[in-house]
Amino acid sequence: MDIAGYAVTMIQSGLGSLASYLAAHVLLCLVPAFIIAGAMTALIPKEAITRFLGRDAPKLISYPAAAVGGFVLAVCSCTIMPLFAGIYKRGAGLGPAITFLFVGPAINILALTYTGAAIGFDIAIARLVLSIVFGIGIGLIMAAIFWVGDRGRAQANEKAGGFGGQASIRPAVWAVMLLLFAVLLVGTLQVGLFTSSYAQVSLPVRGADAIEDGLARLIPFDPSRGEEGVSFQGLFLIGLLALVGAASWKGLSRVDERFNRWTWVALGLLTATLLVAALRVEVMPAGIALHFTGRFLGEVVVLGAVAAVAWKGLDEFEVQEWLWEMWRFVKQIFPLLIVGVFAAGVVRVIIRPEWVEAIAGSNTIAANFVGVVFGVFMYFPTLVEVPIAKMFLDLGMHRGPLLAYLMSDPELSIQSILITASIIGRKRAWVYVFWVALFSTLAGLGFGALVNGADPLLLGAYALLGLAALIGSLTLLHRRPARADRAAEAG
């Protein structure tokens, strides 16, 4: 293939990856997350967050609470970003926020179950345990390294908040938040109640099958490489999403000042888009069949309940602030997400899976690091990563590097790194990337050694020595600024 043809292939892969992502993962997963993040920021008092997740909250409460929050949500790496931004802005300490960011996508229940069934429950259990330990551990490390800046942010939040840490959340806000999480769960849970079809309508829309055939030729589709393609329904949803963006630009950019007619257009289009995404569309030569699934019916009920509770329980200014904060998160995060997904599609053409398999066929430091790097550049949505891992296992990848890949893939995709940097700053983001990469590499190396028959007691001793050295280093790092502060006060 010549250079021009190769460049066209890379661009096609990038655009195909982006189109597939927008069609399959943004609507019922990421859009509710933006809505939830906006509601968190606008409706939940800072004091209610800092009481449990703040820098000064007891560590025995804040870090387990952050881990449990991530575990309960069990969302993908893109969906966790708006939620992470929401709790961080409302005053969560850097450490608990990082724990929440790490644990959420790492211990997705569906992914863990699928991992156990497809690859082995030894890897699934290791992934579960290590994700919780690493999430809390990296959170504590980040808090120890950046404790001076985190203290300053906490003091600024306290001054801006005005009053102490005992603020409560009104019942109407609780109801709205629970219903919004229900929107997310109904849209993502793969259970028979939601996936089954309860009614069907046939529409004589001819040409849809030809459109799908054209999309299959234009956009790469290879499940073994994580390429999902775009369906007729997906194309229609991308069009609706573009309309939502255009209407939101006019209707939400200044919604904190007043509502306008474009506000209502944007909200109507957003609701319609979520409901269309919840349908199952079957394309046939004679037309299309719309299957009204339990997911569709559930979204109708829950979205209606959200509207009713917000109308009765919230005042107009609260709703305005909610919508404005949601739009602010979209403008901050969504462009970076687009860039990251496109870049991952381009890199997918450059980095061949066969190369990774050839390098990672043994349990070495280099092999495990390659598994981590693969998780960075070859982002796959939740559940898609599992068949990819199964493919590498079948090709001969060692189980150690395989675990390193599975530990890093939900955390270190290109778009996740870009978005994390925009929220907490580039320096903190790259330090976070370093620790995740290091821990994932060591996890794969240790697990691979166990698979190869190493003595568990010896590995445990090495782990304890490393932990002791880490704690000692962080203690010295923490004491140095404290001594400087005391000297400045004395002088």
Image (tube, helix red, strand yellow):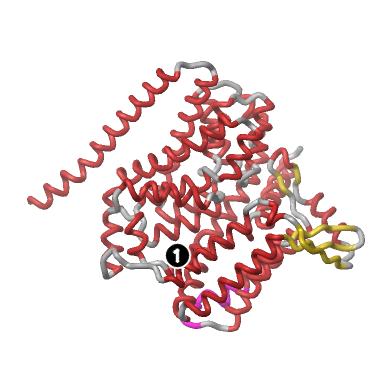
Residue 450: x and y in percent read: 50, 21
Total marks placed: 1
Magenta residues span 247-258
Q: Position of 206 compared to 21: left or right?
A: right
Residue 306: x and y in percent read: 56, 71
Residue at screen point 40% across, 71% down? 170
**Residue 260 magenta-highlighted:** no
Q: Nearer the viewer, residue 465 or 168?
A: 168
Residue designated by label 1: 40
Residue at screen point 45% across, 42% down? 433
Q: Can residue 238 be seen in this view?
A: no
Q: Position of 471 compared to 13: left or right?
A: left
Q: Nearer the viewer, residue 115 or 374?
A: 115
Residue at screen point 62% across, 26% down? 397
Residue 155: x and y in percent read: 26, 60
The quarter of the image holding the N terminus is: top right
